[in-house]
Image (cartoon, helix red, strand yellow):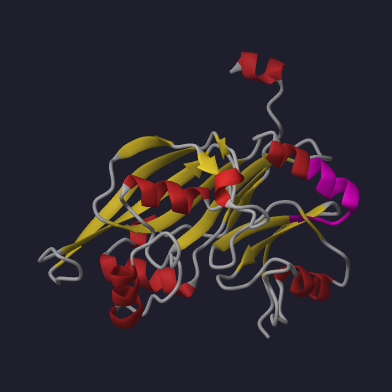
Amino acid sequence: MQPLNILYQDEHLVAVHKPSGLLVHRSALARGETEFLLQRLRDQLGKRVYPVHRLDRPTSGVMVFGLSSEAAALLSEGFSERQVEKRYLAVVRGKAPEQERLDYPLREEDGTRPKAEMPAMPAMTDIRRLDSVELPVQVDRYPVARYSLVEARPLTGRRHQIRRHLSRRGYPIIGDAKHGKSVHNRFFAEQLAAPRLLLAATYLAFDHPLLDKRIQLSCAVGETMKNLFEQFGWQGHLPLDSVRTPPIATPSALQAL
C-alpha cells in the first residue's frame, strides 16, 4: 500500500493529503469498509492521531490531525470559530460567474432526524471562476457542453456546503452523485476518465495552537483531476504541495506594516 503523503508534521500536529474515496474514520455509514484514513495515518506514523475537521469521502485534499488530544481540541476550537482559511477547487457544469458570494441557508444533514425538522443555518461560500472550457459535444440538451474550474472559499462549515451551494446556484460539481446531474457525471466517467467527485481541498491556513507561527498548506490534486486539467488546458491552475510557516502577525506588527 502506498504511504500517505505527509504535507507537514511537528510534535503537535500532522497534515496529510487525503485521497479521494477514503473515509476519514469509522462510522455508522461505513459498514463493510476496512480502510480508513485515521488508521492508515496512525499505522504509518506509529502513534495515535486525533481528527480535527472533516472531508467528505469522495473529496480529496489537505487534512490536519492533532498528535495529542490537547492539540486536537485547540485546533478544533480554531476551526469552529472560523479562524481557518480554506480553499477548494471544483469542476462544475456550465460557465460559472466570475465572482460571487453564495448566501443560502442550509439545513444540517446529519441523518438523525427528518430534514423538515432540521433548522436552516446560515451558510456562505465565496466562489470565483478561474477558467472554463467549451466542448463540441452534446451531453445534455445543448449542442455544446460548457464546464468551469471554480475556486470555492467556504466562510461557514455546513455539511456538503460547497456541493449544495454550487448545485443550488445551477453549477453542480461533476461527479456529485447526490447534488449533481447524472448525464454529465456519466460523460466524465466514460469519456474523460474522471469517475470521481471533482472537488479537492487545496489550501488550508491557520494559526498554530501551540507555536508562534501560522501554517499555510497547499496541496496538489490527485491524478484524475491533474489529467483532466491537462486535457482542458488548465495546467496553470494546478496547485503544488507547499508549506509556509510565517510568524503570527501580532497587533503591533500589523500597525508597523
Q: Position of residue 38 (x, y in %)?
A: 76, 68
Magenta region, residue range: 65-75
Looking at the figure, which quarter contains the N terminus? Answer: bottom right
Q: Quadrant of residue 190?
A: bottom left
Looking at the figure, which quarter contains the C terminus? Answer: top right
Frontmost residue, 50 versus 25:
25
Relative to 175, is 230 on the left or the right?
left
In the image, is residue 192 above or below residue 69?
below
68 is within the stretch colored magenta? yes
Q: Position of residue 48 (x, y in %)?
A: 87, 65
Residue at position x 36%, y 78% in the image? 189
Q: Quadrant of residue 119?
A: top right
Q: Position of residue 18 (x, y in %)?
A: 62, 66
Count of picture labels: 0
Residue at position x 63%, y 19% in the image? 254
Residue at the bottom extreme of this rendering:
1
Q: Quadrant of residue 11?
A: bottom right
Relative to 144, is 31 on the left or the right?
right
Frontmost residue, 60 versus 163:
163
Residue at position x 47%, y 57% in the image? 239
11 is within the stretch colored magenta? no
In the image, is residue 11 above or below residue 198?
above
Q: Main secondary structure of the magenta part?
A: helix
In the image, is residue 96 above or below residue 33?
above
Q: Position of residue 29 (x, y in %)?
A: 67, 70
Residue at position x 66%, y 82% in the image? 2
